[in-house]
Image (cartoon, helix red, strand yellow):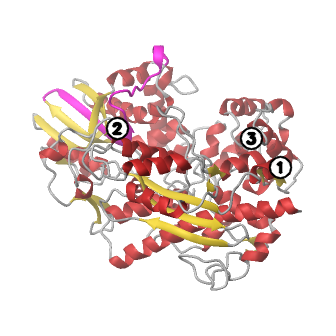
Amino acid sequence: MHDNPRYLTKSRFQLAADCPTKLFYTGKPEYPDKKVEDTFLMALAYGGFQVGELAKQYFPDGVSGDALAYEQALAQTESLMRAEQVTIFEAAIKFENFFVRIDVLVKNGNDFELIEVKSKSYDGFEERFTKSRGGGILSKWKPYLYDVAFQKYVLQSAFPAANVSAFLMMADKSSTCPTDGLNQKFRVTKDANGRKRTVVVSPVTSSDLTPPILGKVNVDAECDVIYSTADGADDEGRSFAERAHFYSESYARDERIAPLPGTICKGCEFRATPEERGEGKKDGFRECWMEKMGWSDADFDEPTILDVWKYPSTRKEQLFLEGRIKMRELTELDITQNDDGKPGISQGMRQWLQVQKARDNDRTPWLDREGLAAEMSKWAFPLHFIDFETSMAAIPFNRGRRPYEGIAFQFSHHVVHADGLVEHAGEFLNVEPGKFPNYDFVRALRSELEWDTGSIFRFADHENSYLNMVYAQLAADPQPPSDADALREFIRTISKSKKDHAEPWEGERNMIDICRLVMRHYYDPATNGSNSIKKVLPAILNSSEYLQKKYSQPIYGSVDGIPSKNFVDWTWIQIEDGMVRDPYQLLPKMFDDVSDRDLELLSGDDDELNDGGAAMTAYGRLQFEDMSDYERDAISAALLKYCELDTLAMVMIYEAWREMLKQ
């Protein structure tokens, strides 16, 4: 059953700006939507759920428009707007078939301030929203500016005689928190209907708000650019206002806008699994491609150019225009395969390897034996495998810290000895509410690694980035811990400075990136081009007889097997339909009240970033939700198991490679 009336809201406008055809699919239960359903959960995972509530504290006279239904919300706002001066939170505004809820609307006579509160951070000293020399809106800011531009258009249209000014209100990274404890004044509770909401549990004082850590930035000039230039126009040449009306009319009539397949389809959320299609669900992605390209079900079984690892989007768009969509239709002329002079294969060489494997239907893994052997010959035992779990808080934990400073709250540590013995040697987890854990984190990491000179491993650049960040925090802290110099020196030994660092270094035990080794020396078609550890691990388990034999027995956490901090007599290899089950699917549920689907989406699958959405969510809940000790202990136990598997996964990749090189 669809919304009645069918208003074009700001979220639907954003969806249509991404792909107009999606308007037809959204909100219909027959079309599964693969985006995280629990938007509050997303905000909790990525640190922004507190920003909206904090923003209200800067407007002490504000009145909440809390009605949920369209007509009641409009009537409520209309009543409040009769006042000469009023500040309304969630003001409901309608014009024709447009409907918006404005985060903060300040009315002073005929002067209106429209304030859109975003959890995104910006730098109040350096940030700009447009390219230099009149080049238009920066792409990273377009979604946010489109949002506020749409709202301003609706508000100005509804009140044509008003003077409307538009603002973004965001966490300013150049500011510092004025007090201790502000972070914990905003908690998550459930209302009588089971909906989560943020509440203020203790008074927010003027000292908490001065100087402010949220900045209000006028974006009228950017809105004008969007309204009047190609920055706001669509591919058909419709202006911002014209496309908004086009979307509105199509949505009101429930008409499907003709699809235009392209690179945007890679992230389409309206996809159905084979099981869902078997249950009668519809697949919006398939419908678009069947209509425009005449594909059959069999065509979707073949890999496409969208799957080619790091292939430029501009080149993909050109291939769409040429009608060459399947990976097997690529030729060597389509991929630059220059040797970049570094060990292993270059990015272009790896892309062509992926294409060749797909074209030849070759499912066998590829290994650069000589190159990988050369790398492994440099390693010193014992080998240390490290994984960090991290988060960010929009409101800092302590006075003097900045919004969205990184927080390192957990690590796991596996060791492989020269004789092949594997052990889960250590771990760290700090989820105490309101505690800034970074310095204790580094102390614990140092105590794990300072006893020998063995090689240390990470997966991707996440760990190195966070070590750089903690190094900077120690250097900038006006009241550093007594061991700050020792902690910084330790960080220097196991990391490499970022390119723009004022004092460059590369430690003698700089952590070795296994993800880079995967990219340069190993490729398994089962990963479909991904280098995420959550794709590489299942692939290598299915191809390595050594791993299957070793871990098909309950040796993990057993008395005579592999020591573990969190598992007892555990068997990692379980076969289902002839394939090894993904070990991550064997772990206990992180949360009882979160769907498996949402948890999977939160966990992510990004080659370059930490796959830590589930852990960030867990940390956020342990920090800010009211829960029983039983729930707190269960989430903490699950966190320990997840992180332990991350470092065991690196061990397994190493063991598989070691055995492959013996063959």
Residue 41, given in percent of the width and then of the height, sits at 41, 58
- Decide if residue 232 is on the left or right side of residue 53: right
Residue found at x 70% / y 71%: 581
Disc 3 residue type (three-letter) = Ile
Q: Quadrant of residue 649?
A: bottom right
Disc with the residue nearer the chain's start (3 vs 1):
3
Residue 332 lies within the magenta run: no
Residue found at x 77% / y 73%: 548
Q: What residue range appears in magenta?
A: 109-135
Foreground pick, 378 / 524 = 378
Mark 1 — residue? 368
Mark 3 — residue? 305
Mark 2 — residue? 173
Q: Residue at the bottom extreme?
A: 559
Tag 3: Cα neighbours inside 10 Å, few (<14), some, or many (≥20)?
A: many
Disc 2 residue type (three-letter) = Lys
> Marks 3 and 2, Cα distance to the nearest angstrom?
38 Å
